Amino acid sequence: ACFLTVHEHLSTGDIVLDFFSGSASTAHAMFLQELGKDDRYQFILVQLPEPCDPKRDAYKDGYETLCDIGEGRIRRAGDKIKTELEESN
C-alpha cells in the first residue's frame, strides 16, 4: 500500500528505502513498476533475521528466517520477469 502512495513521486535513479521489508513486497513492486518504462529505481531493504515458526509451511520449505523468504521472493520475481521479457522478444 505504501508503494502506491510513493510511486507517483519517483524519478529515475531514486532510491526507495524499506526498513521493514518482511517478505520483500516492496522489491517485487519496484520490479513491476519498472516494466515497460525507461525509469530505473534502486531499493534498499532492511529486515532483521526474524526466525520463522518451525510449524509453518515456510520453515518446512527451507526458509529459516523472514530474510530468507524475502530473498527467495526477489529471486523468483526477477526470474519470472526476465523469462516473460525474453519470451516477448
Image (spheres, rainbow, N blue to C red):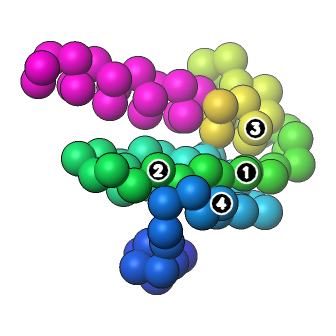
Residue ID for mark 3: 67
Give the residue pinned by disc 1: 45
Q: Which residue is mark 4?
A: 15
Q: Comparing marks 3 and 4, which lies closer to the viewer?
A: 4
Residue 16: horizontal and vertical position, in percent? 64, 63
For residue 27, above or below residue 17: above
The amino acid type, in three-letter code, at marker 2 is Arg
- How far apart marks 3 and 4 lie (CA) works out to 20 Å
In the depicted structure, whether residue 48 falls above or below residue 53 = below
The quadrant the C terminus occupies is top left
Which amino acid type corresponds to the residue marked 4 in the rendered image?
Ile
Q: Which residues are magenta?
A: 72-89
Q: Nearer the viewer, mark 3 or mark 1?
A: 1
Dot 3 crowding, Cα within 10 Å, few <14, some 14–19, many 20+: many
Q: Relative to 62, is 81 on the left or the right?
A: left
User: Mark 2 Cα within 10 Å, few/some/many (few <14, many 20+)?
Assistant: some
Mark 1 to mark 4 CA distance (whole Å): 10 Å
Residue pointed to by mark 2: 40
Residue 42 inside the magenta-drawn segment: no
Going from N to C along the chain, the mark reached first, 3 or 2, is 2
The reply to whether residue 7 is in sight is yes
The earlier-in-sequence mark between 2 and 4 is 4
User: How much space separates mark 3 and mark 1, taking CA atoms?
Assistant: 10 Å
Query: Which residue: 43% across, 45% down?
Result: 31
Secondary structure beneath dot 2 equals loop
